[in-house]
Amino acid sequence: MRQTMHGTAPLTARLEPWMEELLTNPALCRELIDVHGSPVNLHDFSAMGRNVAQLRAAADAHGIDFEIYFARKANKTLGAIDQAVREDCGVDVASLNELRQSLERGVPPERIIVTAAVKSRALLRLAIESHVTISFDNENELRDALEISGERQPPLVAALRLAVAHPSIPPTRFGLPSTQWLAVLRDEGLKHRVKVAGIHFHLNGYDAGSRALGISEALSLIEQLRTLGQDPSFVDMGGGIPMSYLDSASEWGQFWSALEHLPAGDESLTWKSDRLGAVGGPPAAGVYPYHQELVRAEWLDHILTTKPESGQSSIASALRAAQIQLRCEPGRSLLDGCGLTLAEVAFSKHRSDGVPLVGLHMNRTQCRSTSADFLVDPVLVHATHPQRERTFDSAFLVGAYCIEEELLLRRRFEFPGGVAAGDLVAFPNTAGYLMHIVESASHQLPLAANVLWDGGRWVADDIDPPH
C-alpha cells in the first residue's frame, strides 16, 4: 500500500487524480515494473488539454490571435506528439529525428517550426523539402539553407531569431540583434530569396516582464521589415511558461530557510550539507522554481496587460494593432500532470561512516534536468510482500552509477513506515524534461521504458523498440 515518504524539510508533490489512483494500487505498480523494468516512465496525457485550455482562455480574454506549439524536446514519446495534435497544437522541433517523427505522426508541415540551436544540413534539407518554417539563429544558417534550396526555388520561409537587446535582459547566445538581421535582409543577393514569416526569440528564465520587452522589440523589428517589403505575421516568444510542482508556498520557503541555516557538515537536510548552489540567500539561481504563484494563464495575462515602456500600449493592444499573431512553445507547462517515474528499491545499507542509504534500480539522469536537484518529494509504495525486513526512518536515495556522488536526489528523506528492497518509489510529475533531457545509458544500462495510458490500459509508447 502507499506509504508516506518526505524530505526532512517536506516538499509535498501536487498529484493528479490518475497518479493518486495508480499509487494506491501496489499490485498494478508491481506489474508495471515487472513488465517494463525499473525505472519506467508512465504517461497519462489527459492533463495537457487542461493546460492548453488555460493558456487559450487567457489569450481569448484579450482578443489576440494566439497559437501554441508543443516543445517536443521536453518529452521524447510519440504519444506526446499525438496528444498535441489532438489538442490542435503545433509542434516545435529541435532535431532531425524530432522533425521526422512529427511529420510521420501526421503533424501538418505548416504546424511545425524548427528551432534547433544548431542545425545540420540534413535537418535544413528536410525542413525545406517539407515546407516547414525554420527559425534561423544566425546568418550562417540562413546562407546554408539558401545553398540547399537553390536559386530557382521559391523564397525560403524563415523566422528570424531575435537576440533581445534591452539592457535589463542578460546577453544571450541565441539569435542576432535586430540591426544585424536588417543588414542581412538588405543584401541585394539575398533579400528576394527569403520570406520572413515571423520573429522568434528565446529567453532564459520565466520572467513575464522580460517576455513583454521581447515581444515589444520583435514588433518594432517587424515594422522595419515591412519597409523592406517583408510581411511577417507572427511573434514567437518561445517557451519558459511557468508551472508549479508544489501547492505549498510555506513548505517552499521553509525548505530554503532551513537550508540557509544548515551548519557545514550537517547532513540532516542534504547530502554533505549541499546548498544546491544558493549564494547570497535562497533560492538558488540554478534551481527550477518548483513553487510559483504566477503560472500559465495568470502569467500570460500579466504579459498581455504589460506596458513595456511609459506611454506605450499594452502588449495585447500592440499585437492587435499590428495584426500579429502571438505564438509560444511550452514544454514543461503543457506536460504538467502528464507523467510519473516509478522505480524499485534495490537495497538499504549504511555509508562507511554510518549514514543510511537506500539504493534504487535507476540512475541519476533518469529524474533530472539542468536544475541542481528535483525538489519534489517522491511517494513510497510498500510492496505487499517486501523482500527484506523494513528498516530506516531516514536515508539518502542513491543510484546505479559506480561513482561516489551518484545521488538520485540530494535531499535526505524520512520513511516513517520503513523501507525495504522490493518497495517502489514514485517520482511525481516528471513528464516535462525530467525523464529524457539528460538521460544516459552509461554502463550500458538500458534507458527507461516509456509507457502511456491509452484510455483503457497501459501500453508501450512507439518511441521504444519492441521487446
Image (cartoon, rainbow, N blue to C red):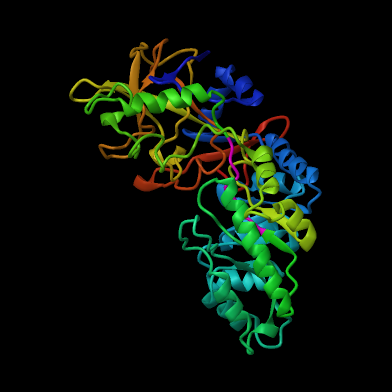
Q: Is residue 65 visible?
A: yes
Query: Which residue is found at the position 65% from the left and 34% from the top?
Result: 44
Q: Quadrant of residue 466?
A: top right
Q: Give 42 or 275, whichever is nearer the viewer.
A: 275
Is residue 238 magenta-colored?
Answer: yes
Magenta span: helix, strand or loop, mainly?
loop
Query: Which residue is found at the position 30% from the left and 33% from the top?
Result: 274
Give the residues in magenta: 236-243
Vertical arrangement, residue 453 with respect to residue 350, above or below: below
How far from the left and from the top, in percent, is residue 293?
Answer: 58, 32
Vertical arrangement, residue 132 with respect to residue 290, above or below: below
Extreme-front residue of the structure? 311
Q: Viewed as shown, does residue 367 lie left or right of 158? A: left
Vertical arrangement, residue 394 with respect to residue 99, above or below: above
Query: Which residue is found at the position 65% from the left and 69% from the top?
Result: 221
Q: Give 161 or 24, whichever is nearer the viewer.
A: 161
Q: Give 129 or 257, whichever is nearer the viewer.
A: 257
Vertical arrangement, residue 294 with respect to residue 197, above or below: above
Q: Is residue 100 visible?
A: no
Is residue 187 magenta-colored?
Answer: no
* Quarter that holds the C terminus: top right
How far from the left and from the top, in percent, is residue 208?
Answer: 59, 46
How far from the left and from the top, in percent, is residue 150?
Answer: 65, 85
How far from the left and from the top, in percent, is residue 38?
Answer: 46, 33
